Amino acid sequence: MEWETVIGLEVHVQLLTKSKLFSGSSTRFGAEPNTQACAVDIALPGVLPVMNKEAARMAVKFGLAVGATINRRSVFARKNYFYPDLPKGYQISQYELPVVQLGKLVIDVDGERKEIGITRAHLEEDAGKSLHEEFEGLTGIDLNRAGTPLLEIVSEPDMRSAREAVAYLKKLHVLVRYLGICDGNMQEGSFRCDANVSVRPRGQHAFGTRAELKNINSFRFVEKAIEYEIARQIDLIEGGGKVVQETRLYDSVRNETRSMRSKEEAHDYRYFPDPDLLPLQLEAGFIEETAKSLPELPDAKRERFVREYGLTAYDAEVLTGAHEIADYYEAAVRAVPGQSKLTANWIIGDLSGYLNRDNLEVTAAPVTADMLAGLVRRIADNTISGKIAKEIFEAMWGGEGDADAVIEKKGLRQITDGSAIERVIEDIMAQNPKQLEQYRCGQEKLFGFFVGQVMKATQGKANPAQVNELLRKKLSGTPA
Ligand code: ADP
Ligand code: MG
């Protein structure tokens, strides 16, 4: 039997507002437990929620960016359940009428483009946190996160493999960071994903029963958790069993999913419109103004990079993977116009490598866009070779000044004086008569030996193209 996988994702995006969704408490991460939870957040009797306008603006930004319908009127509802970190006994969310509906995101997997539908995106508040490890035999409750604004983005069950799910998730991650509505930090839980997974015999129209996977906090784990779950479901069905609808926890240490609880149905939550909150009404002007504030979006930027800078699709994709990288690239290219490809290579290669090594964001790179441009300029005008440029880059990274300063200080200027190179070659020929004779008797691979000797003698500074050309002449004995 051939099986087909069906995946739909629910992503919780923590919005970058300064204060909470319905109170004035700070949303800053990492504060002492319970120091950022006010009377509204801890649900003292008599308090009333007041909607945060910035959160609405961020939801609208997202909706516009995925071509969705922005509902001019949406309704907050109470989702009732009991949990120690939920002080009100309900979560304020949106149910029947969310603020954003029916959008889409286009993903690309192995060169194949595919549209993934976005069913809805709604505003809701986060719950607090239960701390199980800090206290022996007790559970601690930290309500700092209670009331933090989330945008829950629900996809259609349109994905057919773990890789498609990861591609969708990455696309969404890049987008929310471009929009400036989320910092995207998966470790701190600012961008969380639940994956709904089911399998069906290929060709069957009806969906199979799904399991919902929780606790997946990296792109790699999304892929692994889904792969594991697909295999588990297929084994189960082929062994005569049945998939039950349930919530499963992903354990990244053991790389497996485990049953956590049977899946509740919507009616279990007793949703009803929150009587404390008026429906959210968006004026046309507010939506228009928000539309005007949208930045250039990732896809548009990528296409423009191909068009404007003549980059390959791959290079453009990497450089627009975060708007900070794209900004860095454009600043560098503005400083050395005409070197768009070489500049791209340096960013994708050395700069990214150093950033990774030192665990730095591009905005904190010790080599600024202007400094990189200065280096590229000296490669392009033949002052230095590409190899020496790497040495200079390292020196710049270490704080030794810009490219010109390092070239002067270390005397790294490339030797392009033909007669100087010829003199070096003649010396080397004189010092290695045996190799010279073997070369002349047909041992052509010794050419590399001579190139190496010349580069060594010039500390890598001889222009490589000239070295090659002059060596060919001299070694073969033709008069120069
Ligand atoms: P809930 O909020 O209870 O999890 P929803 O109906 O909002 O339920 O669906 C949640 C997610 O599950 C959506 O992303 C949807 O695409 C996905 N989904 C629904 N049915 C299936 C299925 N049979 N297999 C895989 N994913 C599914
Ligand atoms: Mg769900």
Image: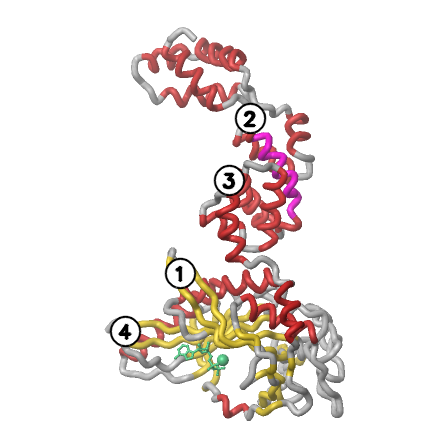
Q: Which residue is mark 2?
A: 382
- Whole-percent x, y for residue 233 in the image: 35, 76
Crowding near the residue tagged with mark 4, few <14, some 14–19, many ≥20 C-alpha atoms within 10 Å? few
Q: Between marks 2 and 1, how big is the CA–CA gap?
A: 41 Å
Residue 254 in view of the camera: yes
Q: Is residue 129 above or below residue 446?
A: below
Kindly indicate whether the residue at mark 3 contacts the one at mark 1 (C-beta within 8 angstroms): no
- Residue 92, quarter of picture: bottom right
Q: Which residue is mark 3?
A: 341
Crowding near the residue tagged with mark 1, few <14, some 14–19, many ≥20 C-alpha atoms within 10 Å? few
Mark 3 residue type? Lys
Q: Is mark 4 within 8 Å of ligand 1?
A: no
Residue 113 tag number? 1
User: Mark 4 or 1, which is nearer the eye?
Assistant: 1
Q: Between marks 4 and 3, how big is the CA–CA gap?
A: 45 Å
Residue situated in front as seen by the camera: 268 or 376: 376
Q: Does label 2 or label 1 sit earlier along the sequence?
A: 1
Position of 259 compared to 50: left or right? left
Q: Does label 4 or label 1 sit earlier along the sequence?
A: 1
Residue situated in front as seen by the camera: 192 or 418: 418
Q: Between marks 1 and 3, how big is the CA–CA gap?
A: 26 Å
Kindly indicate whether the residue at mark 1 contacts the one at mark 2 (C-beta within 8 angstroms): no
At 56% from the left and 71% from the top, the residue drawn is: 63
Q: Does label 1 or label 3 sit earlier along the sequence?
A: 1
Secondary element under disc 4, as helix, strand or loop, is: loop
At 40% from the left and 66% from the top, the residue drawn is: 162
What is the magenta segment's predominant secondary structure?
A: helix
Secondary element under disc 1, as helix, strand or loop, is: strand
Mark 4 residue type? Arg
Q: Which residues are magenta?
A: 365-379
How many marks on residues?
4
